[in-house]
Image: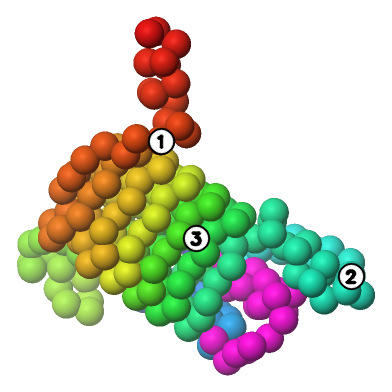
Amino acid sequence: MTSSKEWAKMLRGELYMPWDQDLQDNRTRCKLACEAFNAAGNASRRQKVELWRKIIGDTRPLPPIDLDPKQDEQLFDETDPFVDGPVSVDHGLNFKVGAGTFLNFNLLVLDTCLITIGERVLFGPNVSLYGAIHPFDPAVRQGLKGPEAGKEIHIEDDVWIGGSVIILAGVRIGRGCTIGAGAVVTRNVPPFHFAAGNPARVIRKIDSEMDPARQDNAIDA
């Protein structure tokens, strides 16, 4: 785990110096872990979970092996996401993904600050999560010599993210949302809404029995 002052500033969303040795060491660790995961190909579910946990720094022990391959695979249904490589993750330690979530191939994650994905979330291919930002002022930015920053991204339970969607720093996507393919999400999307476009805008409300607002309205009626 990292402990430098720059790491702490990064997590708080403050300007930090990205060439800090502690940060670089963790990026190298995460890059090597991603390479190992991507090279695993058609490895077993157990092997892929073990490699995925190394990317995100999840140190939980794996459950005992079940001799039935199908039963062994099902051991991870309630504990881990299903990840289809290749993936590219910047830090890993700031990336939290819920059980039963599917992350499709060519996922790119810049987890400068915390990025969370809930349970039962579906990602299309080529999704990018950009938690990193740079100062607007070039005098502060200074190319490779200047500071960077970031903002958190949160995707709640039961969301469907279409292919080639880009989600920018500071965005929260509420539970039960659908984001249309190719959207660039620059602002929050309220729960149980469909959003699409560049920049993404809310198109309509999603009528779902899972929506607490619908249940409240039924009671009032």
Specify few, some or many for label 2: CA neighbours under 10 Å numbering under 14, 14-19, or 20 or more: few
Q: Is residue 52 magenta?
A: yes
User: Within the image, what quadrant is residue 128 found in?
Assistant: bottom left
Instruction: Give me the C-alpha separation between circle 2 and circle 1.
Output: 38 Å
Quadrant occupied by the N terminus: bottom right
Along the horizontal axis of the image, is 159 left or right of 148?
right
Q: Identify the element where label 1 is drawn.
A: loop
Q: Residue at x 34, y 75 (%)?
A: 126
Specify few, some or many for label 3: CA neighbours under 10 Å numbering under 14, 14-19, or 20 or more: many
In the rendering, at what x and y percent does residue 125 appear?
Answer: 38, 74
Q: Amino acid at mark 2?
A: Asp
In the rendering, at what x and y percent does residue 144 appear?
Answer: 22, 79
Disc assigned to residue 208: 1
Q: Residue at x 23, y 49 (%)?
A: 195
Q: Amino acid at mark 3?
A: Phe
Q: Is residue 193 above or below residue 24?
A: above
Along the horizontal axis of the image, is 164 left or right of 51?
left
Along the horizontal axis of the image, is 152 left or right of 68?
left
